Image (cartoon, grey):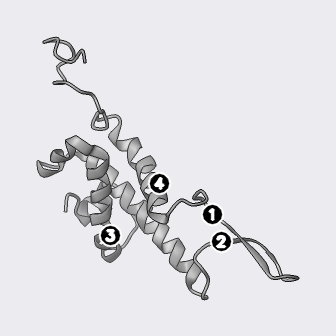
Amino acid sequence: MYVDYDFYKSNYQGTMDETNFNKHEPRAEAYIRYFLFSKAYILDSSPIPGIQMAICAVTDTIGDHFTAKASRTVCGGSGAIVKSENNDGYSVSYAIEQKDGETEEVYLRKKAYDTAYLYLLPIGVLSRKVGCYCDHECGCDYL
C-alpha cells in the first residue's frame, strides 16, 4: 500500500474507519496508477505527499459511492435514487449522476479522476508531454 491508515487519519484527516479504508485503498491506488500512465513507476519509489493525498481523496470518493449505493439497496431497491413514481400504470424514474448507457465502472473512474486531478495536476504528474522534460535545454522535446 502506498498510503497507510495513519497518513489518512493524520495528514489527510479522513473520517473513514480503518476496515473500509483498507478495503477501498487498493482500488484507489489502481486508479492513480491508471491516471499516471507512463509515470506510474513513481509509486514504486518513496511516497510523494501529493500522490498520497490524491489516493486518500479517491479512497473517500470510492467509499462514499459504495456506502450511498448500499444504503439505497437496504430495502430491496435497485441502488438508484427514485426521481419520480406513478402508481396509476406503475412507472418509476430514477435520478442518476451517470449518463445513459454509462457503466458504473466508467462513472466511478471519471469521478475518481475529477477528485485526483486537484492533487496531481500541481505536482506535474498528469503531463503527457513527449520528450526528456528538460524544457528545451537540449532541444530534444520539439516533437
Residue occupying image coordinates x 30% and y 60%: 8
Mark 2 or mark 4, which is nearer the start of the sequence? 2
Mark 3 or mark 4, which is nearer the start of the sequence? 3
In this rendered view, identify the residue nearer to me: 68 or 102: 102
- CA gap, disc 3 and disc 2: 25 Å
- CA gap, disc 1 and disc 4: 13 Å
Give the foreground label among 3 and 1. 1
User: Dot 4: what SS?
Assistant: helix
Indicate which disc residue 85 carries: none
Residue 84 appearing in the image: yes
Q: Which residue is mark 4?
A: 111
- CA gap, disc 3 and disc 1: 25 Å
Q: Can you name the residue that lies furthest to the bottom here?
A: 75
The type of residue carrying mark 2 is: Ile
Label 4 crowd (10 A; few <14 / some 14-19 / many >=20): some
Question: Which quadrant is the C terminus positioned in?
Answer: top left
**Image position, residue 24 (x, y; %):** 33, 68
Label 3 crowd (10 A; few <14 / some 14-19 / many >=20): many
Q: Which residue is mark 2?
A: 81
Label 2 crowd (10 A; few <14 / some 14-19 / many >=20): some
Q: Is residue 20 left or right of residue 77?
A: left
Q: Which residue is mark 1?
A: 96
User: Dot 1: what SS?
Assistant: loop
Q: Which residue is mark 3?
A: 21
The type of residue carrying mark 3 is: Phe
Are the two marked residues, 3 and 2, in contact with CB atoms closer than 8 angstroms?
no
Residue occupying image coordinates x 28% and y 71%: 22
Question: Which quadrant is the N terminus positioned in?
Answer: bottom left
Label 1 crowd (10 A; few <14 / some 14-19 / many >=20): few
Mark 4 or mark 1, which is nearer the start of the sequence? 1
